[in-house]
Image: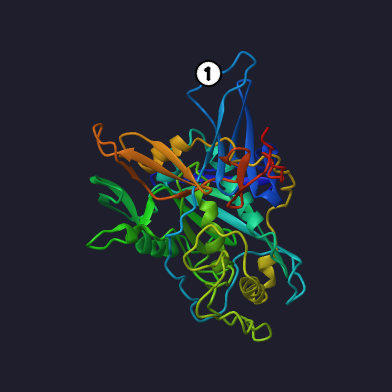
Amino acid sequence: ADSLVFTESNDGVAPETIMNGTELEENLFQERKKMAAVAVEDIDGTIQVMGVISETMRIAPLPAMARSEDGHIAHKIYKMERSITQCENDADTVPEGTTTCKRHGSAVFANVVPDEFFVEVHMMVDKYHYRPFQERHQLVKYLALNLALVNMRFEDTSNPKIQFLLTSVKVEPNFAVTYQDKDFVWPISNRTYAHANLTFYTLLEKYGRSPADITVAVTGLILADNYEYFTYNEVAVKGQARLGGVCNVNYSMVMVEDVPMSFGMVSVLPHELGHALGSPHDGLTEMWNERLPPRNDCRKDSDYGHFIMHRSEPGNQKFSNCSREHMSAFISTLPTSCFELKAKRNCTTELKELPGASTNLTKICQIAHPNFLEWNVVKKNCRFECCSPRSLDDDEPTCGVEHFLPDGAECGPGKRCVRGTCGYYDEYGAPTTPRQSA
């Protein structure tokens, strides 16, 4: 967008800062085919790169490293693992009544759906997510990179093609409903969790009337269900959304968790936005428009395929035909005012390098597991785990949940992760020829 509104709520006062969207995008580069997004900054004469270079690979500067004589600073490429055990709560169904949009714009022809639908996005973060960022522009660039990667997951949508436009960012420090319980991977210590259901209901009540087409609330805490007997299963939920929430006057809201700087939300947010755009889980059907009924083969009893709207497989890269048709049917019911853009679209920068090439995995582990004694990174199959011994005399490590490696991160000799697949790619995500051994 040409301009972006940044709001930081503080003791009930929420001053707004208008940030130049064009300047923010100057250093953002993306490569849509390879699912890559990086931000490049010149800080005191030193070039620093942060972002995703493949589905499971990240790139980030090593802050503790001194600059070389020619001004270069070391960067680290690291891998984030994909979880195969995560699941989420079913999205709530749309209450009776029609969806309505709050925005006003010039009139367009009724019942005409554009070839490309730009969904305006308001992003809101809590203090737990904002805290690791030193400056507000770093947070905004990080969120923009994540949304660029989400857009790549929607590249294969049609009738209309769906893309997301970041128009405003707000820091709302205490939107999460929190509670203390034992650390599920470090039970000798406690940690703070966000109560998944209560937080989402609170968000709907207080912020359901989005200033944009949809609000994305991002917490830096682990979402969990607060049950009496706390187990790993209670932290399996990664996000929530209302079915058909886009442009709805009362519940234009999705919620996700994210370890700051990890790009982890990219594995969850497309799924939740799919719900907000009318797509149920694969294997289920929803009637949005009688003239565009669900396909006969959309309801299945067993194999749902490995698609974004799978009930319990986060991080898949494509929507099924059923999901795409559900979204098309839902969008056909939206008022024409929903297709009006308040922000001008000028996001034409190219992602040149995949952002996973420079992410600091150790730093992400420190944020994700503050109770660990040390932070060792274990990579496998485009995912990574953070591990630590229970004591200085204990050689047996304890590991946390698997994380996804950002696009472009290395996953083996000459290999990088791109869209969750470890293969022979260059730093831009283009296929390469395997090196022949001598």
Residue at screen point 31% across, 48% down: 185
| Among the 4 quarters of the image, the one containing residue 319 | bottom right
Question: Could you tell me residue 49's position as x and y percent?
Answer: 61, 33
Picture residue at 26% right of the left edge, 59% below the top: 230
Image coordinates of residue 37 in percent, x first then y, are 64, 44
Q: Is residue 19 visible?
A: no
Count the numbered circles shown.
1
- Vertical placement of residue 203 versus 77, above or below: below
In the rendered structure, the answer to whether residue 12 lies left or right of residue 253 reads: left
**Disc 1 designates what residue?**
66
- For disc 1, the neighbor class at 10 Å (few under 14, some 14 to 19, many from 20) is few
Decide: is 294 above or below 121. below
Visible residue check, residue 26:
yes
Where does the image place residue 421, in percent across and percent down from the top left? 60, 52
Name the secondary structure under disc 1: loop
Is 347 displayed left or right of 56 in the figure?
Answer: right
| Frontmost residue, 82 versus 309 | 82
Q: Name which quarter of the figure residue 52 lies in.
A: top right
Q: Position of residue 106 (x, y in %)?
A: 74, 65
- State the residue in front, 366 or 332: 366
The C terminus lies in quadrant: top right
Rendered image quadrant of residue 158: bottom right
